[in-house]
Image: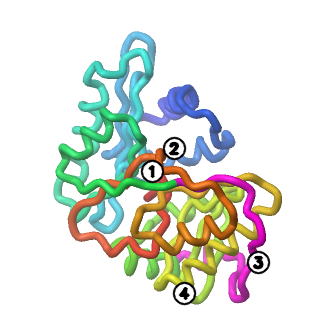
Amino acid sequence: MREQDVAPVIELILADEEHPSPPKVLHNRFAHPLTTDPEGAWVAEDEQGIAGCGFAFLREDVWILSQLAVRLDVQSAGIGSQLLRRTWEYGANAKAHLLASSTDSRALRAYTRLGLDAHPCFRADGVPRDVTEPPGIRTGDASDIPFTEAVDRAVRGAAHGPDIAVLLASDHDLLVSDRGYAVVSEKGEPRLLAAYDEDAARALLRAVLSRAGDRSIGVNWITGRQQWAIEEVLAARLTLSSDTGALFVGGALGPLQPYLPSGAYL
């Protein structure tokens, strides 16, 4: 991938998204791998331009698939398989692998063939009701990133490195307690949440839900292991669904509990 590919890659992604993120968020996200992981950033081209893209990150020896997308008119033509192969090779020697998949049957089959374990996910949507923010939660900033890295290593097995900074630069908020943190999007939705224990995770999620106000939000990538999160979103009267996709994991990761990953940065 090259710098001039960022704009057409964004166009490719927008063609397949019902509720796209703001332009600033999209640009930061898809320009990010050019700086952090240029060897893991790939595009496929044809006579019409960008036909597909694949981005993989390496974070402290953990491989993460951030994006794999193919233009609608050339899907099932083998482009996705080639992009997946290139991004997978970038993490050939990684100690662990982690990605979030859509419900597309081709994607689910391809990721299973990588030897990764699938963890189906739930999603919760709606306007949170009757949620009170617990004490001990504050708004953080870049100076709190070393703390988030320590939590990540305990929960995920690797820090997010530069990814938290790019989220903060994309108008996301950081909520911090003495036992965990949450990154909240400009829409008021949790984009990452990790904590040392379930009580801390519950408190952080309640803080996110309480700050949503009258906005309808989504809480995504809730695996069956995150019962604490399922209980909290149901208590806030959000609607739970099970058609969101799956988290695929393999290798020497952390417990991923309590944890709500980001689809882009895992």
Label 3 and label 4: CA atoms lie apart by 19 Å
**Real-space CA distance between mark 1 and mark 2, rounded to the nearest whole angstrom:** 7 Å
Along the line of sight, which residue is nearer the eye, 258 or 67?
258
Amino acid on which disc 4 is placed: Arg
Q: Residue at x 57, y 55 (%)?
A: 240
Closer to the eye: label 2 or 3: 3
Q: Which mark is residue 132?
A: 3
Whether the magenta-drawn stretch holds residue 66 is answered as no
Labels 1, 4: front one? 4
Between 195 and 220, the one lying in front of the other is 220
Q: For the residue carrying disc 3, how many other residues have a C-alpha within 10 Å: few (<14), some (14-19), or many (20+)?
A: some
**Mark 2 sits on what residue?**
31
Q: What residue does disc 1 label?
A: 35
The spot of residue 195 in percent (x, y) is: 50, 80
Crowdedness of circle 1 by 10 Å Cα count: few (<14), some, many (20+)?
A: few
The Cα–Cα distance between marks 4 and 2, rounded to whole angstroms, is 32 Å
Give the alpha-carbon distance from disc 1 to disc 4, as whole Å.
Answer: 31 Å
Q: Residue at x 29, y 25 (%)?
A: 79
Give the label, 3 or 4, closer to the camera.
Answer: 3
Q: Which residue is mark 4?
A: 179
Residue stretch rendered in magenta on the structure: 123-146
